[in-house]
Image (spheres, rainbow, N blue to C red):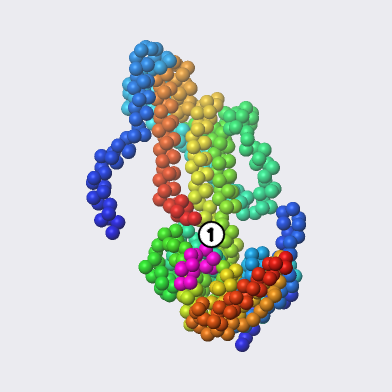
Amino acid sequence: MQEIIKLAGVSKVFVSEKGQEVLAVDNVSIVVNESEFVCLLGPSGSGKSTILRMLAGLTPVTAGKVEVLGQEVRSPRSEASMVLQDYSLLPWRSVVENVAFGLELRKVPKEERLRIAHEMVELVGLGEFAHASPYELSGGMQQRAAIARALATNPRILYMDEPFGALDAFTRRQMQQELLSLWLKDKKTVVFVTHSVEEAVYLATRIIVMSARPGRVIADFPVDIPYPRRSSDVAFGKMVDDLMHMLMELAYER
Amino acid sequence: MTSVDKGPRKVGAAPKHCWRLLRPLVALMMLFVVWQLMALRLGNFLILPPLDAVVRILLNPFQDLLRLGSMVHNAQVSLVRVLLGYSMAALIGIPLGILMGYSARARVALQGVLSMLRPIPPLAWVPLILAWFGTASLATLFGLRGGAGYVYLSNIRVSMVFIIFISSFFPILINTMFGVRNVRRTLLDSALTLGASQGDLIRKVILPAALPSIFTGLRGGMGAAWGSLVAAEMLPGSIAGLGYLISHAQSYSRTDIVMAGMIAISIIGSALDFLFRLVEEKRFKWQSLAR
């Protein structure tokens, strides 16, 4: 398996407005191989979103090195796309125009990019709503559009920052299933940040558990349960229990 | 399916709809009635001319008033002045607001000057403006002494344009800056990860996102510009314009013309505001509906 993402001794210090230094990420080293579905799991304040932002080139590291495909990341790279919790669709553009946005920024001719965008919109099941405005869509539909937008540039890596965190339980499960079936088709590398233990066990091929303040890696293991997973499976339930236990212990230690 | 829903409801609700349109006018009608009754009772043309005298002036907008030209002519002169000072304010205020919203360094550098100038009311500028520009007009500025352009340009004094400029400048600047600063961080982040350059970010995300706020500034600026018109046109050297017309009419004790001029200023001001509101509702629907 090819190594695609590498964090080596990465730390991040934030300086507050009063000049106080806060260590958000402490000496984290992770190697992600191509086609892995990695979940970064941890309580809030564990620096998992910060790690994702550093991977995406949105936030500089304080110490250490972030590499994607063997090159140091200093700014966002074209091999990767990102999906954020709040969808971040441009409200003045229609769904299909939003999905075409990344291609537009890459100077793909209009006809071509709209064709691809329409395909993507169909792929995520929003065909009927291609020309609707984002504000006319429900949260789940908006997130589908955001996923279509991220996929439209055909990235090798997908960064997802709690993408389903704002959705209700039913929509959330539905979106998880859809994401998995998309992933199983071409196995793009996914780094998925979540604080839901169940979500991590449902989706990931590998789970990395983070502790809070400072953010450190405290566990890193594969999930060998075959897809499609069911929360009623014994192995599934045991893993959720074990993880929950681990996170609870962490909380008590502090 | 919506057309099926709307059809019958519209027909049944027609009288109600009319009433809804008329309701805001009720108080106005009452004001007019009280005005007319008071005027007739007072019988003093100087203090309160009857409504019908004022309306008659407004209904003959092309009739010459006090040898100053017609209401329409004076309104035109005023509009040109306002648009001139206003466009200058927009031309400087919008780019400066974008710069100050986008770059913290520019904001910090310019904050001191602007917060010192902002609280000064436009009228407080008058003595200084007169000392600087006197009665110089645009014709003087361009060195014109005659010809077709002279007639127009000599009517536009630098001092008037400046007053109008200064009153519309700050609403435009502040709202533009506010709009740019308040673009959601995640919109910028997601555009960056999709490959946006700094230029893309400004043109394709920041500007469209800030547009409703810039437009609010333009609307407020227009109100302020129109509001300072009378003050501007009372400056020495003015020989036309609605503001000049009403102050001149007052010295002739023609309160009817004063009131007709005031109403004309009100009508044009609301019409301009209405135009802005129309565009806001059409173009920026997403803003009120988006989270």
Q: Position of residue A22 (x, y in %)?
A: 74, 61
- The answer to whether any part of residue B118 appears in the image is yes
Using the image, determine if residue B41 lies above or below residue B242: above
> Dot 1 corresponds to which residue?
B205
Count neighbours of disc 1 (C-alpha within 10 A) and say few if under 14, some if 14 to 19, many if 20 or more.
many
Note whether residue B67 is visible: no
Q: Amino acid at mark 1?
A: Val
Classify residue A193 by image quadrant.
Answer: bottom right
Query: Residue A165: within the magenta?
Result: yes
- Segment colored magenta: A163-174
Disc tally is 1
Tell which subunit mark 1 falls on. Answer: B
Between B72 and A51, the one lying in front of the other is A51
Residue A201, compared with residue B182, is above or below; it is: below
Instruction: Give the camera-side residue of B218 and A20.
Output: A20
- Which residue occupies 37% across, 24% down? B31
Q: Residue at x 69, y 48 (%)?
A: B108
